[in-house]
Amino acid sequence: MPADAPGPRVVLVGPPGAGKSTVGAALAQRWRLTVRDTDADVERTAGKPIGEIFVDDGEPRFRALERDAVQAALAEHDGVLALGGGAVLDPGTRAALAAYRAGGGVVVFLDVSLAHAAPRVGLNRSRPLLLGNPRARWQALMEARRPVYEEVATVRVPTDGLRPADVAEAIESALAGPRVAGATEEEQG
């Protein structure tokens, strides 16, 4: 987004383990901005962790809280915004992202393979049989969500084998430099 436009400079989307929160922090540091994570916003609003929201209140309640958090962040936050992995599933969130993009906003899809996401989200640990096959569930989730991530994104940036700082640099390169994300000439060095 242009520096004087309302809304985040960039929005990060992607599956669990793509690095949205850590890359968001690295990008915010590079651009001297703040980072906001809608998962943290949801937990703060609900007063409990996301896992407890799912158990106590159900997924529909969580998705409603998530949609509200995304819409509020798009309206209020002017730094780097990281969305929860499933936020893009909500039609209202997709519409809000489309409006943000129509106004010049940038949505980056952080793409990651199962092999690289697994250790980041703990899928390499042994799990009780009752939990099923989390790696297969992640793969199925990604296959279902990939078209949605691609639909809402301005640009796709692969994260496999990269450190968060390297991904932040790749985002800058993909966006033709920090000016696209609203950095001033002084910030560009």
Image (cartoon, rainbow, N blue to C red):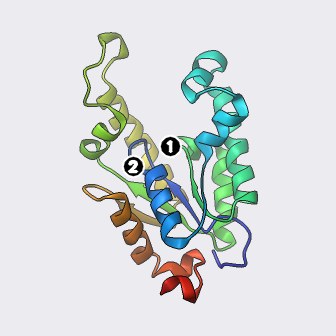
- Do labels 1 and 2 touch, CB within 8 Å? yes
Nearer to us in this view, 41 or 138? 41
Q: Secondary structure at mark 1?
A: loop
Q: Residues within 10 Å of mark 2 (few under 14, many from 20)?
A: many
Say above or below: 82 vs 62: below
| Residue on which disc 1 sits | 85
Q: CA distance from mark 1 to mark 2?
A: 9 Å
Q: Determine which quarter of the picture holds residue 158.
A: bottom left
At label 1, which amino acid type do we have? Gly
Residue 110 horizontal/vertical position (percent) = 42, 56
The tag earlier along the polypeptide, 1 or 2, is 2
| Residue on which disc 2 sits | 18
Which residue is drawn at the image coordinates 52% and 57% (left, top)? 12
Nearer to us in this view, 148 or 133? 133
Residue 123 horizontal/vertical position (percent) = 30, 31
At label 2, which amino acid type do we have? Ala
